Image (tube, rainbow, N blue to C red):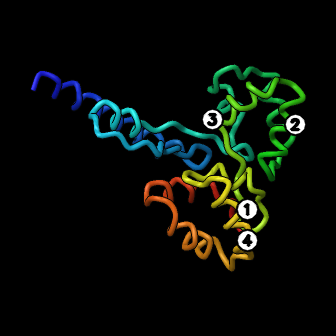
């Protein structure tokens, strides 16, 4: 009983963060953790949302909110638009920072996924998608529409992961 007010406060913070993310508009999308722990603290932590920025639509101000991103890196992020694959992002940004820093940036940004063109690495940005599933999704092409792709994806990932995946898809 002693810890119940703390749990309620954490839940209130999560709700406030979720409302703030919705208010951010199209450039920020929620990333959902696939962790499923039974403890209240772990559940609250895994439910916390982190905004990922669309590399093709994020603003200079958006990029400046990321750790270890200054004006120079913002220019580099914006110079190589439009990003069509995660491999392209890694290659271009890797000219300026090491692989570890590129991987760190990937925790905060995403390349929009074209369901009929994206390579395996780019598809793996979608929550719940690993090498095997990405290869299966590629083999299932072409998809007549984004909805057809999402129908295929629904068989493999949770509803929460699917909601997040939708926000990663490029308009067709």
Q: Residue at x 47, y 46 (%)?
A: 34
**Numbered disc in front, either 4 or 2:** 4
Q: Which residue carries the number 2 mark?
A: 92
Cα–Cα gap, marks 4 and 3? 28 Å
User: Residue 87, located in which quarter of the rendered image?
Assistant: top right
Q: Are marks 1 and 3 in contact (CB under 8 Å)?
A: no
Cα–Cα gap, marks 4 and 2? 28 Å
Q: Residue at x 21, y 32 (%)?
A: 8
> In terms of secondary structure, where does tag 2 sit?
helix
> In terms of secondary structure, where does tag 1 sit?
loop
Tell me if mark 1 has few (under 14), some (14-19) or many (20+) residues whose alpha carbon lies within 10 angstroms of its own.
some
Q: Which residue carries the number 3 mark?
A: 108
> In terms of secondary structure, where does tag 4 sit?
helix
- Which mark is drawn over residue 139? 4
Q: Say left or right for 85 vs 128.
A: right
Cα–Cα gap, marks 3 and 2? 17 Å
Cα–Cα gap, marks 4 and 1? 14 Å
Horizontal and vertical percent position of residue 50: 51, 36
The answer to whether residue 14 of the structure is visible from this angle is: yes
Tell me if mark 3 has few (under 14), some (14-19) or many (20+) residues whose alpha carbon lies within 10 angstroms of its own.
many
Name which of mark 4 and mark 3 comes first in the sequence. Answer: 3
Cα–Cα gap, marks 1 and 3? 19 Å
Name which of mark 4 and mark 2 comes first in the sequence. Answer: 2
**Numbered disc in front, either 4 or 1:** 4
């Amino acid at each position: 009983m002693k810890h119940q007010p703390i749990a309620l406060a954490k839940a209130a913070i999560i709700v406030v963060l979720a409302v703030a993310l919705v208010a951010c508009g199209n450039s920020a999308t929620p990333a959902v953790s696939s962790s499923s722990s039974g403890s209240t603290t772990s559940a609250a932590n895994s439910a916390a949302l982190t905004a990922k920025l669309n590399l093709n639509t994020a603003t200079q101000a958006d990029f400046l909110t990321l750790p270890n991103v200054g004006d120079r890196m913002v220019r580099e992020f914006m110079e190589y638009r439009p990003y069509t694959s995660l491999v392209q992002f890694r290659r271009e940004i890797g000219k300026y920072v090491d692989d570890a820093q590129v991987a760190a940036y990937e925790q905060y940004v995403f390349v929009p996924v074209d369901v009929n063109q994206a390579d395996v690495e780019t598809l793996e940005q979608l929550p719940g998608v690993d090498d095997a599933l990405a290869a299966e999704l590629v083999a299932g092409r072409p998809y007549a529409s984004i909805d057809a792709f999402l129908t295929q994806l629904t068989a493999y990932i949770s509803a929460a992961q699917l909601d997040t995946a939708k926000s990663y898809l490029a308009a067709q």
